[in-house]
Amino acid sequence: MKTNSFGDTGLSVSVLGLGAGQVGAGGLGETEAAAVLNTALDLGITLIDTADCYGLSEERIGRHLRARRDEFVLSSKCGHDVPGTQDWTPENVRASVERSLQRLQTDRIDILHLHSCTQDKLADGSLVDAMDELVSAGKVRFVAYSGENEHLVAAITSGRFASVETSVNIADQWSLHHALPLAQEHGLGVIAKRPIANAVWKYDTRPDGVYGEVYWDRLQQLSLDLGDDPLAFALRFSAFAPGVCAAIMGTAKVDNLRRAVATVEHGPLPEDQLADVERRWSQNGQGFDGQV
Ligand SMILES: NC(=O)c1ccc[n+]([C@@H]2O[C@H](COP(=O)([O-])OP(=O)(O)OC[C@H]3O[C@@H](n4cnc5c(N)ncnc54)[C@H](OP(=O)(O)O)[C@@H]3O)[C@@H](O)[C@H]2O)c1
């Protein structure tokens, strides 16, 4: 699979990463989770993204990939929901990372993101100081920020982060236009999350209460012609968008993972399709902000 350098970090990542949110679902069996995680590596994926708050995800990565730890770049997130600590505090960051390392059965997290805090939390600096201390202690390799809009821009221009994770897809292009050029200028790695817009094209009518509902509305407004292979259209758009190092598609299904890997082998969308996305976005997407 194609690989990209990851900003100025010296890391290299496969253009398709695995978003391991879905692997954390309690309803998913252990055998299925193990199959998705191992198949990802078998197929050449070298970036796995998880978070402290993704259910069983970290635990399962530890259980099923401990022996293959050197085969992939491990991305996780921190900042909230650790019992006994206040959200967005240095204590929370430290406790979260200790818990993640234990669950992941590893001695290091390669990329540690602050998980979508607002820019006022960043301005204080103590959160990132705590992350830097974890780097000095060898528990984290690179400090990163996950988020959108003005908060993301503040993080990129702060000079304190090696990389960012943000939404990039056919229905969510704010970062693509406003933040990724800045990230490139500052030498940051970029992980594109939600790269297939949560596959909302699969709903014939407006879904209610699903993650990605807003994307369903946007796709109606954009009237994009996704052709007979919407997955390919969506994934080829985001994985090869300018400035994106890796697109982390989420899945709990080995078949969908295999399809995604085969899809990125086709490279970017043809120029005429890209031009059509661009035209429709400039006509109807200008008011759409980045979705966390
Ligand atoms: N930092 C953050 O705040 C944040 C926020 C959101 C996501 N993330 C990360 O980004 C990753 C990806 O984001 P995401 O999962 O929200 O969005 P996504 O990758 O755009 O969409 C994932 C969804 O698409 C479905 N899907 C995959 N292949 C499909 C196919 N061929 N046909 C139909 N449906 C298909 C998956 O269901 P199946 O399981 O059925 O395949 C899953 O529900 C997450 O796993 C997580 O690691 C981070």
Image (spheres, helix red, strand yellow):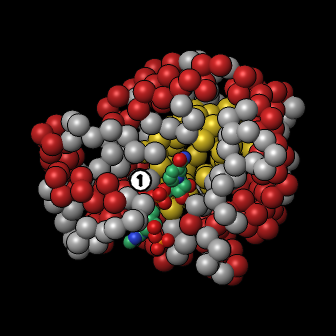
Q: Nearer the viewer, residue 16 or 198?
A: 198
Residue 177 percent coordinates (x, y) = 32, 32
Q: Is disc 1 surrounded by few (<14), some (14 to 19) or many (20+) residues within 10 Å?
A: many
SS label for mark 1: loop
| Residue 258 seen by the camera | no
**Residue at disc 1, CB closer than 8 Å to ligand 1:** yes
Q: Is residue 9 above or below residue 95?
A: above
The amino acid on which the numbered mark 1 sits, given as a three-letter code, is: Pro
Please state if 237 lies on the left or on the right of 134 as rendered. Answer: left
Residue 268 percent coordinates (x, y) = 32, 50
Instruction: Look at 33% across and 45% down and name the residue there.
Output: 172
Instruction: Look at 75% across and 48% down and name the residue there.
Output: 82
Residue 104 percent coordinates (x, y) = 78, 57
Instruction: Look at 72% across and 22% down and name the residue there.
Output: 126
> Total of numbered circles in the picture?
1
Residue 19 percent coordinates (x, y) = 55, 57
Q: Is residue 97 above or below residue 30?
A: above
Instruction: Look at 70% across and 49% down and name the residue there.
Output: 81
Q: Nearer the viewer, residue 260 or 277?
A: 277
Q: Nearer the viewer, residue 110 or 24?
A: 24
| Residue 47 seen by the camera | yes
Q: Quadrant of residue 217?
A: bottom left
Please state if 154 lies on the left or on the right of 73 as rendered. Answer: left
Q: Is residue 202 above or below residue 185?
A: below
Disc 1 marks which residue?
195
